[in-house]
Image (cartoon, rainbow, N blue to C red):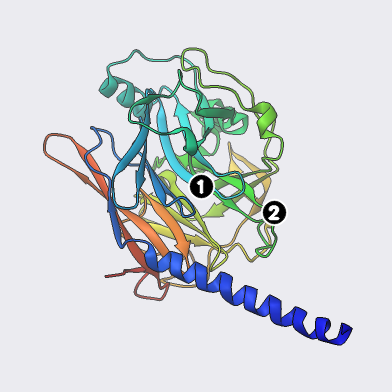
Amino acid sequence: MKIKKIFLLPVFFILLTLSVQSQNVNMLESLPDSVYSGKQGKLHVQGVALDQANRCIYFSFTDRLIKMDLSGKLIGSVTGFVGHLGDLDFNTEDGKIYGSLEYKNDAIGKGIRKSLGVQNNNENGFYIAIFDGSRIVRPNMDAEKEDLLRTIYIKEAVTDYEAEVKAGNGTKPHRFACSGIDGVAFAPAIGSPNSDKKYLYVAYGVYGDTDRDDNDHQVLLKYDIANWNKLAQPLLQDKLHHSGPARPSEKYFIKTGSTNYGIQNLAYDAFTGNFFAAVYRGTKAQFPNYDLFVIDAHKMPVKAQISSGGQHIKVKTLSLLQAGPKDENTGIRGWHFEWGATGLCPIGDGLFYISHNKKYKDGMQESTIYKYKWVGDAQNSFIRVK
């Protein structure tokens, strides 16, 4: 009798594994090839996140979060933001949506508030906004007045944003040319792609000034969010709070050459075990100025030195994937790809939803996400699934 049980046990696990794999395939096959957001005001889409279990998708449109079913029917929205709601990611462990949220007084912040007809806020504040999607049940729910999100203050980014660094005989604002935060993604520890524990990675925005040399790296902050429930606070836009982690677990640098405003969309793809970083291409002539970079998360961080404020500082650097086009002068690898900076969302088996944003003559903006297949060869990064 014991022999029969021992024999049946591995058979049971094989059947269970095949069942789970079949369910995953069925879920992927049932995902539509595209989802249309509809026109969503005069501020453009910043990111998308998919909740496969509940078959709904989220779009951030700078001043609002949109929740739709996969047929494109609006379920609800969160409005009233007077800051910059950016990239999104869905955390499968707690079922919540995480997004970057900025309040600042640079050209972007002032432009957003002007378009919304609100007064300037004199305080800078960078946050991770944590949305409870189950509570988003109707259009135009108020971000401050209804109990559906909490925020975490990202002190490290604010400190770098407000710092001044030496440059020649003068100074430059913003350490590492930090313009805030944008890309967000959950992923295992870098160098340990098979680990079950997930961390939140937050990417800096980086000013693309061509007359400074300390903005040729992308910056990633790594956070363990295990105690964030104790730190999270409601959103009060007239009185920004400072409740959040004192520092990140790690701070990483990736040499890409300059970009305009850093990593717009950061996505971790469990199928390849790598990070995908979509940017607005830079304009420095000495760099290839790619639109898309892939960070090799299989490789351990490497200790190195970079230049900042006229000094060499010790940091940890990450490696770009050794695939695709290579710039012979710099060794930097990446791809020229038109889409991704306004929405890049892995959905499994090397498939992604990628946003195609559109602006009309009257200023109204929209997005359609299309299904793409990751290729990653010398000619193509992604190929659209039709």
Residue lying at the far left in this picture: please name it.
Answer: 361
Left or right side of 284 for 206: right
Residue 338 visible at all:
no
How far across and down, in percent of the image, does residue 51 sit? Answer: 47, 50
For the point 55% across and 22% down, the residue is 234
For the point 63% across and 78% down, the residue is 15
| Mark 1: amino acid | Phe
Number of numbered discs visible in the structure rendering: 2
For the point 65% across and 63% down, the residue is 193
- Please report whichever mark, 2 or 1, sits nearer to the chain's N-terminal start: 1
For the point 35% across and 56% down, the residue is 354
Front one among 17 and 131: 17
Q: Residues within 10 Å of mark 1 (few under 14, many from 20)?
A: many
| Image quarter hosting the N terminus | bottom right
**Image: 250 above or below 299:** above
SS for callout 1? strand
How far across and down, in percent of the image, does residue 288 sit? Answer: 38, 60
How far across and down, in percent of the image, does residue 63 sit? Answer: 35, 30
Tell me which corner region of the image, top left, top right, bottom left or bottom right, holds residue 329.
bottom left
Tell me which corner region of the image, top left, top right, bottom left or bottom right, holds residue 155.
top right
Residue named by callout 2: 197
Front one among 185 and 290: 185
Left or right side of 212 for 225: right
Residue named by callout 1: 90
